[in-house]
Image (spheres, rainbow, N blue to C red):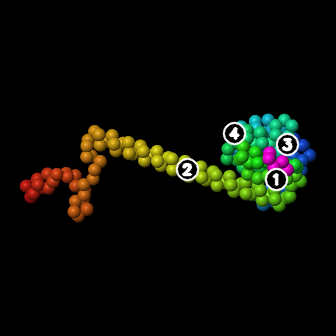
Amino acid sequence: MTHEQPGLLLVDDEPLVLRALERQLRGILRTPRPGYRIEAYTRPAEALQRARETVFDVVISDYRMPEMNGVAFLRAFRAIQPVAARLILSGQADLGGLADAVNEAGIMRYLSKPWDEAELVFAIENALKERRLLLENQRLADELRASRSQLSLQEAELRRLERESPGITQVNWGPDGEVLLDPDGETERKRGQWE
């Protein structure tokens, strides 16, 4: 999967609605935020295939589509790209179905048709912020796992050394902060004999 620039995936079975949404988003996102990639599909299966090939930051899907409804599409999309923000667009308020969408497919936001431009921009900006936070959390969790793994490797090596040479991993400190290599004081007694 490639991820050159932030991407928005739009899925709606109605070509006119899809073109209007795409045109409006290109106008909104072009000036203040250059470099966005917007891809639009009327068939959910094609959009899922594309999701297997490239990374999308945000996906906006229609709720009612004949080939595959929005909940099923977003659930399948989530399996491919779990960190992408998912929004659903609908002209009919089916609250039970939308509750299923939120729970089953991890929908971040519901947008009504016709959409309000300010609400659309707000939803996309929040979706992008949430995605960045999720990615940062994943990165920090990965770093923590890696440091724990490294620590575990060091602990295992210390245990191995201790088994082979008991006491080798122990540090003995003298009264003035020096490291005593001979905890029994044999070196000190011999030093007195040498002087």
* Residue indicated by mark 1: 111
Alpha-carbon distance for marks 2 and 4?
A: 20 Å
Q: Secondary structure at mark 1?
A: strand
Q: Kindly identify which residue carries mark 4.
A: 80
Q: Secondary structure at mark 3?
A: loop
Q: Nearer the viewer, mark 2 or mark 3?
A: 3
- In magenta, the rendered stretch is 93-97
Residue at the (28%, 39%) spot, across then down: 164
Q: Secondary structure at mark 4?
A: helix
Report the quarter where the N terminus lies: top right
Marks 4, 1: nearer the viewer: 1
Q: Of tags 3 and 4, which is closer to the observer? A: 3
- Name the residue beneath numbered marker 3: 64
User: Does residue 52 appear left or right of residue 46 in this picture?
Assistant: left
Between the C-alphas of marks 1 and 3, the distance is 13 Å
Residue 123: give x, y in percent of width and height: 77, 56
